[in-house]
Amino acid sequence: MSTLATTDEHISATRAKTIQPVWVRVMHWTNAVAMILMIMSGWQIYNASPLFDFRFSHDITLGGWLGGALLWHFAAMWLLMINGLAYLIAGFVSGRFRKKLLPITPAGVLHDVRAALTFKLSHDDLSVYNYVQRTLYAGIIVVGVLIVLSGLSIWKPVQLYYLVALFGDYPTARYVHFFCMAAICAFLVVHVALALLVPKSLRAMIIGR
């Protein structure tokens, strides 16, 4: 009986363990909504002056025309910038980034990539990120900073000329912005795929446990 009671207590404690705190969940879903709005409106803006020999289907864009897309893009931009900045500050101050994302080693990444490709990557403890997750999450933070800086350069190239100079020139800032968008889209595809493969990780981001 004692052993059974101890086992039950351990199971209850495991189930009650908070994997994702409230502030992480709120900011995660806020960022997700803002990013989707920015991507879809950004595709409509791109269509008005494409960088390459293709355009995005009108069915997956937002805004209807250039003016409408710009309104959506700027509205979502402020939401993303404010929420993203708050997330970065909270992540650094709380030590979450250090605990969750470090260390990242080439050997660890290669090992976990091989395990993921052979469907042997363990997801028993959701509170610990594997090397693939650490690399993706750390990388998307860097991409997020770059897309904001390049976006500001495109928006206010005269007033923020020093940001434009950071990228070399205005056309280069546009290319950086585009490829950062593409990287974020690729991240979202992988992120959603992993959430579907490991449903308990999605549940943790919804209810925390």
Image (cartoon, helix red, strand yellow):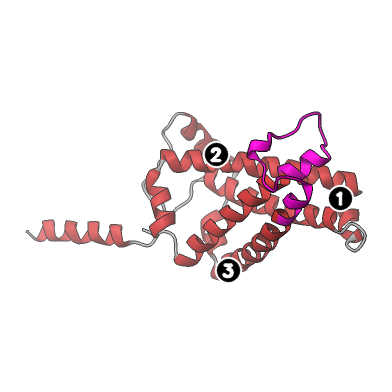
Secondary structure, mark 1, is helix
The quadrant in which residue 72 appears is bottom right
Write down the residue under mark 1.
167
Which range is magenta? 43-71
Against 1, residue 86 (above or below) is below
Alpha-carbon distance for marks 3 and 2? 25 Å
Alpha-carbon distance for marks 3 and 1? 28 Å
Residue type at mark 1: give it: Phe
Residue type at mark 3: give it: Ala
Please give the name of the residue rendered at 42% of the width and 38% of the height, measured from the top-left corner.
Answer: 197
Please give the name of the residue rendered at 69% of the width and 63% of the height, measured from the top-left corner.
Answer: 78
Secondary structure, mark 2, is helix
Any part of residue 151 in sight: yes
Farthest left residue in view: 1
Residue type at mark 2: give it: Val
Can you give x and y, in whole percent of width and height, for residue 21 in the image?
Answer: 44, 64
Any part of residue 127 in sight: no
